[in-house]
Image: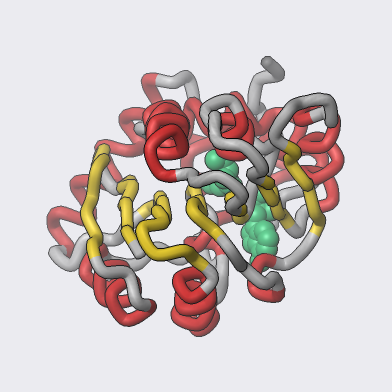
């Protein structure tokens, strides 16, 4: 697995973060060393796919990057006639995702380079947004979640993983610090951590758990619960 040294390079300082070829090439390492709980979300997506995906339905991995969630769903679906749509608007991610996913398996994964704000979700028993909503403009988030919910089958499952912001400023500062400690233990230097933080400013916009809960309820999800929290990273399960 190629090691993420992007922000060790001082030429990267100052520019906003982008999902380009350089990021796509080191992405699995970047996620594992930066997102506490990431591997657990992929395991849970597999377990939820076994439980919730129904025959002849669609599954969506929105903001799929290299397709980790789509692959977890594919390897767990035993129902017949399902299709998985893995969608990302980064050309570099989609190109790599296509070569990782291949095309020989029983459950087809259709990898598409699209903006997830423009897609139609239909006949869905499972939708995953694993750390993707946080990259959309806040003003676009309500509408997208409404459209996701209305394209889902009754009893379908939505998995939403996000970096969150605590309403209490002291707790927020503590959680950010603990997260930086996690990154230091994963061999990122202070300089890499602070450059990445600056690059993500205005690109990754975290919201509070209360805001996510309100939006999910307003979108039409009947049951909403947090199944994972590690510092300021959460994963939420919502049932249509
Ligand atoms: C995983 N889910 O491994 N339309 C489509 N894709 C988008 C958009 C958009 N408007 N905005 C951002 N993206 C993956 C990890 S990464 C999370 C997801 C992270 C895409 C973007 O190109 C990137 O590939 C992905 O969302 C977010 O489980 O890097 O922290």
Question: Quick check: 239 left or right of 42?
Answer: left
User: In the depicted view, which residue is nearer to us: 12 or 125?
Assistant: 125
User: In the depicted view, which residue is nearer to us: 35 or 116?
Assistant: 116
Q: Given the current orientation, which residue lies at the most extreme top position?
A: 1
Q: Quadrant of residue 40?
A: top left
Q: Residue at x 41, y 56 (%)?
A: 156
Q: Quadrant of residue 120?
A: bottom right
Image quadrant in which the N terminus is located: top right
Question: How is the rendered protein coloured?
Answer: secondary structure
Q: Residue at x 49, y 46 (%)?
A: 54
Question: Quick check: 184 left or right of 24?
Answer: left
Q: Position of residue 218 (x, y in %)?
A: 32, 81
Could you tell me how many numbered marks the image carries? 0
Image quadrant in which the C terminus is located: bottom left
Note whether 116 is above or below 139 in the view shown.
above
Q: Position of residue 102 (x, y in %)?
A: 83, 28
Residue 177 in sight in this render: yes
User: In the depicted view, which residue is nearer to us: 78 or 152?
Assistant: 78
Note whether 90 is above or below 24 in the view shown.
below
Q: Position of residue 179 (x, y in %)?
A: 32, 38
Q: Residue at x 45, y 80 (%)?
A: 142
Question: Quick check: 214 left or right of 2?
Answer: left
Residue 141 in sight in this render: no
Question: Quick check: 93 left or right of 237?
Answer: right
Q: Position of residue 6 (x, y in %)?
A: 68, 34
Note whether 82 is above or below 25 in the view shown.
below
Note whether 219 is above or below 103 in the view shown.
below
């Amino acid at each position: 697995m190629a090691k993420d040294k992007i922000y060790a390079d001082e030429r990267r300082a100052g520019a906003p973060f982008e999902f380009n070829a350089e990021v796509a090439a080191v992405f699995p390492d970047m996620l594992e060393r930066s997102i506490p709980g990431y591997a657990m979300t992929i395991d849970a997506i597999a377990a939820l796919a076994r439980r919730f995906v129904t025959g002849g339905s669609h599954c969506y991995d929105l903001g799929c990057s290299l397709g980790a969630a789509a692959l977890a769903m594919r390897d767990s679906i035993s129902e017949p006639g399902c299709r998985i749509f893995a969608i990302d608007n980064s050309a570099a991610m989609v190109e790599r995702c296509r070569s990782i996913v291949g095309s020989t398996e029983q459950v087809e994964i259709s990898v598409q380079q699209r903006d997830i704000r423009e897609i139609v979700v239909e006949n869905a028993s499972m939708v995953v947004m694993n750390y993707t909503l946080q990259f959309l403009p806040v003003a676009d988030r309500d509408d997208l979640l409404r459209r996701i919910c209305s394209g889902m089958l009754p009893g379908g499952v939505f998995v939403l993983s996000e970096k969150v912001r605590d309403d209490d400023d002291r707790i927020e500062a503590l959680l950010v610090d603990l997260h930086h400690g996690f990154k230091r233990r994963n061999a990122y230097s202070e300089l890499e951590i602070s450059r990445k933080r600056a690059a993500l400013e205005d690109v990754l916009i975290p919201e509070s758990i209360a805001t996510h809960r309100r939006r999910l309820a307003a979108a039409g999800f009947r049951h909403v619960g947090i199944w994972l929290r590690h510092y300021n990273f959460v994963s939420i399960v919502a049932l249509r």
